[in-house]
Image (cartoon, helix red, strand yellow):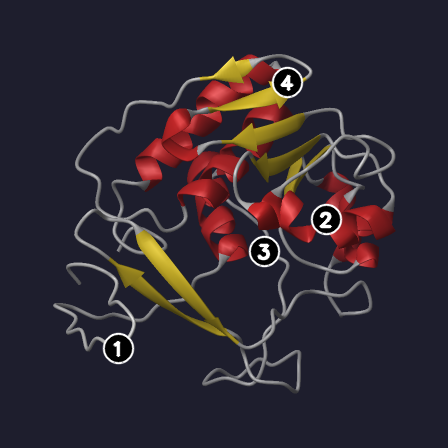
Amino acid sequence: MERVPAQGEIAHASETWEEPGGGGAVAAVQLARLAGACTFFTALGEERVETTFRPEPQRRAFTFLDDEAERTITLLGPKLHPHAADPLPWRELAEIDAVYFCAGDAGALRAARQARVVVATARELPTLRDAAVELDAVVASADDPEELYRAHDVEPSPRLVVRTKGAGGGSYEPGGSWETAPVPGPVRDAYGAGDSFAAGLAFALSLGRPPAEALAFAARCGAEALTRRGAHGA
């Protein structure tokens, strides 16, 4: 639609579509693009599919996409996430090169720590505290109050703390800052750019790239996501 409606307005969408979304799904597809394959650990609620792990309804979201390709999201229902007690192939994580953790309980994160590289989002800060495992990187925001990370928020401290500023690049500790990457085409949809960035960071760190190179690579992944329509580039 042209813009997000103001209070009391009625707005008409020029186009609508429905697809699986969420940060984990976006990151899984991005990692599959980069690595050729990705194992996605998740939880499904009651939905129009055969497999159900939770008795409660599947979370849904309504996303407005305006003429500037910015997304505004309304979430419907609580987040469903994997628990360590779920019948998932947790032992396989010991053979995984990189994990991006964006939802789960503390036990799930401890299981994820079997992987060689673990990157987590600061959106799950309470879980990161409870799990008390050393993370290779935490991806936070420099501006969003729900994704802030302060010194010693998690113990043991992550090896790398990344703070993104959207189009303004970002900073990292220890280290410095990085610039945003050029967008390789028309900007179509901002949905998923941040999680594509985080997935790219996990992939690059798993290759042994130093932070500056890994962040430059991640920035390119985020920039490319802006050129794709929808959560997965439909």
Q: Residue at x 62, y 63 (%)?
A: 42
Spatial distance from mark 4 to mark 2, Cα to Cα? 26 Å
Q: As shown in the figure, which amino acid type bears the numbered disc 2?
A: Leu
Q: Which mark, residue 125?
A: 2
Q: Residue at x 25, y 52 (%)?
A: 229
- Closest to the camera, between mark 1 and mark 2, is 1
Number of labels in the image equals 4
Q: Earlier in the sequence, mark 3 or mark 1?
A: 1
Q: Earlier in the sequence, mark 1 or mark 2?
A: 1
Q: As shown in the figure, which amino acid type bears the numbered disc 4?
A: Gly
Could you tell me if residue 101 is visible in this image? no
Q: Secondary structure at mark 1?
A: loop
Residue 34 is situated, as x and y percent measured from the top left of the image, at: 45, 35
Q: Quadrant of residue 161?
A: top right
Q: Is residue 25 above or below residue 187?
A: below
Q: As shown in the figure, which amino acid type bears the numbered disc 1?
A: Gly
Spatial distance from mark 1 to mark 4, Cα to Cα? 52 Å
Q: Residues within 10 Å of mark 3 (few under 14, many from 20)?
A: some
Q: Is residue 100 above or below residue 62?
A: above
Q: Earlier in the sequence, mark 2 or mark 3?
A: 3
Q: Quadrant of the C terminus?
A: bottom left
Could you tell me if residue 194 is visible in this image? yes
Task: Kindly check if marks 3 and 1 are in contact, taking CB atoms under 8 A apart as contact.
Answer: no
Q: Secondary structure at mark 4?
A: loop
Q: Residue at x 58, y 56 (%)?
A: 40
Q: Residue at x 54, y 54 (%)?
A: 24
Q: Secondary structure at mark 2?
A: helix
Task: Kindly check if marks 2 and 3 are in contact, taking CB atoms under 8 A apart as contact.
Answer: no
Q: Earlier in the sequence, mark 3 or mark 4?
A: 3
Q: Which mark, residue 40?
A: 3
- Mark 1 — residue? 8
Q: Earlier in the sequence, mark 1 or mark 4?
A: 1
